[in-house]
């Protein structure tokens, strides 16, 4: 039986080797997911622990003994959707991710910790723990573990000069510096500051900053789409527009452009050319 990922996002903030190196009590893999992400059973089995008390270091926990003889712990949940003794199928929802630990809902940073062991029982003890990433649906850990994180680091470095930020070491590890740089990027580009490179943050990261100082993005107007429109929407949001940065220059973006042009003494035509880009700080 192959295991599947318990989360839809696979970026790893702390891998099995690092847990082992620091002699973690219950070594496993940490996935960088925000609070409220759906957690599913990696394989079919029986829930042997469903602890909704955040009092311990593991926070709220669901532990499963799988039909294939393995077992796992899912730690730091914000919500449990299963009970002890309940049978679950592979992919069944078991709870929501969180940051629960040490008697608090925010005892640690938001993430999911999964510990996989090569036997039933021994949950939360570190007995028989093995690397989950080596056993996921035949996917080699090295090919996936840091791929998303590495891409984020590379894109953040593309933006480093424009943002006045230091370049990151491109190591595929979601460490404190990478998290801090994502938050800095989000703050500077009008995004929700959560340190997670979700779809909207990824959309902006995927665009390119101006190649040289004083070079404006291309002229855009109603009906335009693409990275320049995302940049426009984020620039307007810095002035309180409240737009979704989706790259589509629709009626709401058009109205926001005209309002900006009117309030800044520009020709109100809804066309974002060099003059309007300059007024927007671009």
Image (cartoon, rainbow, N blue to C red):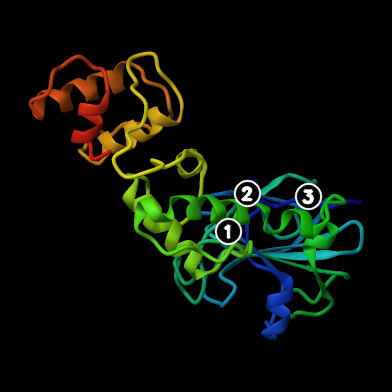
Q: Tell which circle, 1 or 2, labels the residue nearer the N-terminal end.
A: 2
Q: Secondary structure at mark 3?
A: loop
List x then y, in percent, for residue 4. 78, 49
User: Compared to 229, does 190 lie above or below?
Assistant: below
Q: Secondary structure at mark 2?
A: loop
Q: Mark 2 Cα within 10 Å, few/some/many (few <14, many 20+)?
A: some
Q: Tell which circle, 3 or 1, labels the residue nearer the N-terminal end.
A: 3
**CB within 8 Å, label 3 to label 2:** no
Please indicate whether residue 73 sits to the left or right of residue 167 in the image: right
Disc 1 to disc 2, C-alpha distance: 8 Å
Q: Quadrant of residue 150?
A: bottom right
**CB within 8 Å, label 1 to label 2:** yes
- Which residue corresponds to mark 2? 9
- Which residue corresponds to mark 3? 4
- Which residue corresponds to mark 1? 32
User: Compared to 13, does 217 lie above or below?
Assistant: above
Q: Quadrant of residue 240?
A: top left
List x then y, in percent, for residue 224. 40, 18
Q: Quadrant of residue 227?
A: top left
Judge by depth and name the residue closer to the eye, 7 or 154. Answer: 154
């Amino acid at each position: 039986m192959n295991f599947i990922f318990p989360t839809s996002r696979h970026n790893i903030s702390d891998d099995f080797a690092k847990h082992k190196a620091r002699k973690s009590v219950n070594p496993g893999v940490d996935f960088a997911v925000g609070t409220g992400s759906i957690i599913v059973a990696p394989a079919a089995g029986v829930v042997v622990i469903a602890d909704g008390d955040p009092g311990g270091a593991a926070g709220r926990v669901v532990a499963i003994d799988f039909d294939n003889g393995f077992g796992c712990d899912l730690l730091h949940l914000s919500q449990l959707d299963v009970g002890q003794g309940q049978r679950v199928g592979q992919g069944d929802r078991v709870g929501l991710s969180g940051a629960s630990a040490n008697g608090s809902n925010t005892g640690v940073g938001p993430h999911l910790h999964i510990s996989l062991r090569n036997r039933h029982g021994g949950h939360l003890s570190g007995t028989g723990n093995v690397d989950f990433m080596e056993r996921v649906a035949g996917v080699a850990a090295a090919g996936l573990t840091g791929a998303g994180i590495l891409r984020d680091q590379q894109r953040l470095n593309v933006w480093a000069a424009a943002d006045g930020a230091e370049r990151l070491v491109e190591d595929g590890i979601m460490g404190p510096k990478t998290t801090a740089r994502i938050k800095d990027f989000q703050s500077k580009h009008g995004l929700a500051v959560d340190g997670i490179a979700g779809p909207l943050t990824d959309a902006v990261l995927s665009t390119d900053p101006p190649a040289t100082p004083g070079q404006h993005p291309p002229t855009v107007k109603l009906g335009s789409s693409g990275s320049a429109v995302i940049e426009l929407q984020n620039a307007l949001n810095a002035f309180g527009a409240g737009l979704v940065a989706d790259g589509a220059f629709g009626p709401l973006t058009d109205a926001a452009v005209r309002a900006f042009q009117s309030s800044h003494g520009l020709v109100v035509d809804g066309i974002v050319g060099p003059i309007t880009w300059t007024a927007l700080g671009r």
